[in-house]
Amino acid sequence: MNLLAKRIQKIKQSLRDDNLEQAASLLVNTIASDEIFSYWASCCNGSEQIPKILKFIRHIAFNRRISTAVINFMEGDLRIGTEFFLQHILGPEDLLFILVHERDHLILRNLYPSAISEDYPAELLNFGEDAYINAIARRYIPSTLPERFYQKPQELLLTGRHRTIDWDYFNVKEDGLNMLQQVHANLYRQNHELLKVIGEHIVSRAPGSGYGKWMDLILRWYQSMQSRPKASKHLGKGTLSSNGAESNDMESQGSAESEAQNNQVDSPEHGDQAVEEEKQASSEDPDHRTEKDALEVSENKTGEDQVAPDEQKAEGERPCSDQDNPKKAQRGRSKADGAADPNDQSGTAASIDEIMGSIVPLVRQENFERPLSGPKGRSSHGRNGLLKVPLPRLKPHDQITWLIQQTCDDPKIRQRVSIFEGDALEHVDGLINGILSDRSIEKVCDGYSLSVPLSISRRDAFTLSAGAVPVMWQKRMGVERPNIDVYIDVSGSMERFYGYIPYIYDSLKHVMNRIFQFSTQVVQVEHDDQFLLTNGGTCFNSVAQHMVEHQIRAAILLSDGQSHLTNENIESLKCELEHLIYIKVQENDYKNWELIATETICLLSEKGVA
């Protein structure tokens, strides 16, 4: 037994002896040890960034009343149920999994609130996110905790037991294919070490899909189940015990020798670039990837995701299909074997809402109990028929921003907070302070006055303090520059920069007049609005016409520049605008507002950084 396994056994012995404080102290020492940091780093292909998640845990306690685990990264608090630890924590990989699991919840909820609809059912949201995160979080480490914890038929979508899941129950058809089945296989396709441990072999030819696509499929499945009088599955105690017994032996072996060979988490990006990267990734050696593919959120577009022909041949497995239906696999098994019959209608039939409410989460989401400002998800009920999209909840020096910066290796996740990192933040602050100082009030001496002026000069104030009254007062006139209107590009190409918008609002609030958001339409919003109004497109000519019609003289415009202006509008704006500050989020080859701007500021100077 290795040193880490011995440490875990000592903790469990203290729990059996009902010495919770000693067990917590031993767990703190274990987590703080060099051995566990080295083990976690080796699981993550040598990355020392992901194990830094330990920096966010400051207090650990065991609690008999907690059924699983509660993690609050805001407070640095980890509480673990006594029975949960005794029964389900087999090794350090399980501890890392529950920490990464909750971290990924925070990333999804705060960076990608627009991936779900505003009226998404709360318990379904937890179920769908857990299923998604249980797949992507275990590309770091092959913990088999979900497979050991969830064994009821209604829970198996939360596991990697792809061939055991009843795909007649979890079914969303598109073009004759069960898309839930296809995407589930796609989510687990890179978890090679985990699949080996649990005895699964998945070859996915499904298109690349992200968080948004997955959550949309879960919602469609839920809606189809609601249309039935009662869900076809009961809430009985039936488990797949023969499979479970076999897997427990394998899992015990895997917990001692598990080292993740793949650190990838699907990327949240979509579009042509993501398609190309996905194609390249399919032919790469899976043992030499990084966390580059993290937390996919692809709402409107999906990328190709094909396994290279030589890889298919090497694995020797057919793609997931209805041939893997567990009903067929279980026809030769009797109830005496302990197999759960998916068609068993014994017990009380339950509605889908009752089923969702009965599923216990591995980690209780205490981080989301605080009320949120602004919409909880996207809505189609925005003004003028526009989509109402919540802004990412990010700020400089915020705990969530810091968590991402410290523990996330994925460049596509990190780019969403890159402007808030060290030198970059100082650079942007300096640029914005330059705008603020340029808009400040200038006061100059403009002669003398017999009447007392509203603003008394320093010299006159000194004369008054000496007990004398000036015969002639210095007259100072204020030259106050008017507040400036702000135009914010909220088109689809700006989606990765949405998290910067609240920061821009706050930074410019002392000189801002009106705020306009634009895609193909221009709409006015308030400073404290925590949402965007967009249709995804971009039309700079609509913005130009809006400026001319409203006789805008001074403006700040934030955009990535990915559209064009007609020569006619360029000439009109040159005549109309006295001052235009163009804040370009990233350097690229597009040239449009630069032709008009009196000042151009580039937030990220290197092409392709963001």
Image (cartoon, rainbow, N blue to C red):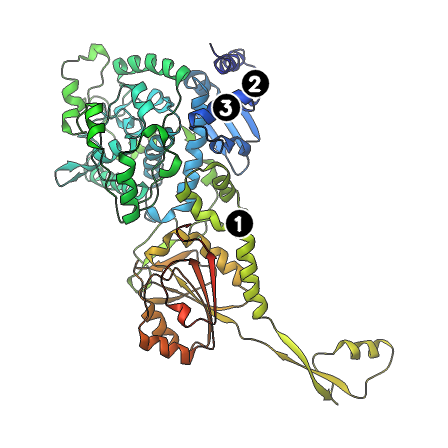
Q: Is residue 95 left or right of residue 193?
A: right
Q: Is residue 532 left or right of residue 153?
A: right
Viewer-nearest residue: 193 or 184: 193
> Tag 2 or tag 1, which sits nearer the N-term?
2
Residue bearing mark 1: 396
The amino acid marked with disc number 2 is Leu
Q: Residues within 10 Å of mark 1 (few under 14, many from 20)?
A: some
Above/below status of 161 relative to 290: above
> Tag 1 or tag 3, which sits nearer the N-term?
3
Viewer-nearest residue: 348 or 260: 260
Disc 1, SS: loop
Q: Nearer the viewer, mark 1 or mark 2?
A: 1
**How many discs appear?**
3
Give the Cα separation between the discs numbered 1 and 2.
Answer: 35 Å
Relative image position of residue 290 (x, y in whole percent): 39, 34
Residue bearing mark 3: 38
Q: Is residue 421 left or right of residue 228?
A: right
Q: List the single residue furthest toward the left.
A: 176
- Labels 3 and 1 touching (C-beta < 8 A): no
> Tag 2 or tag 3, which sits nearer the N-term?
2
Q: Nearer the viewer, mark 3 or mark 2?
A: 3
Relative image position of residue 238 (x, y in whole percent): 26, 19
Relative image position of residue 462 (x, y in whole percent): 82, 76
The amino acid marked with disc number 3 is Ser
Disc 2, SS: helix
Disc 3, SS: helix
Residue bearing mark 2: 26
Q: Residue at x 35, y 16 (%)?
A: 251
Q: Residues within 10 Å of mark 3 (few under 14, many from 20)?
A: some
Give the Cα separation between the discs numbered 3 and 2.
Answer: 18 Å
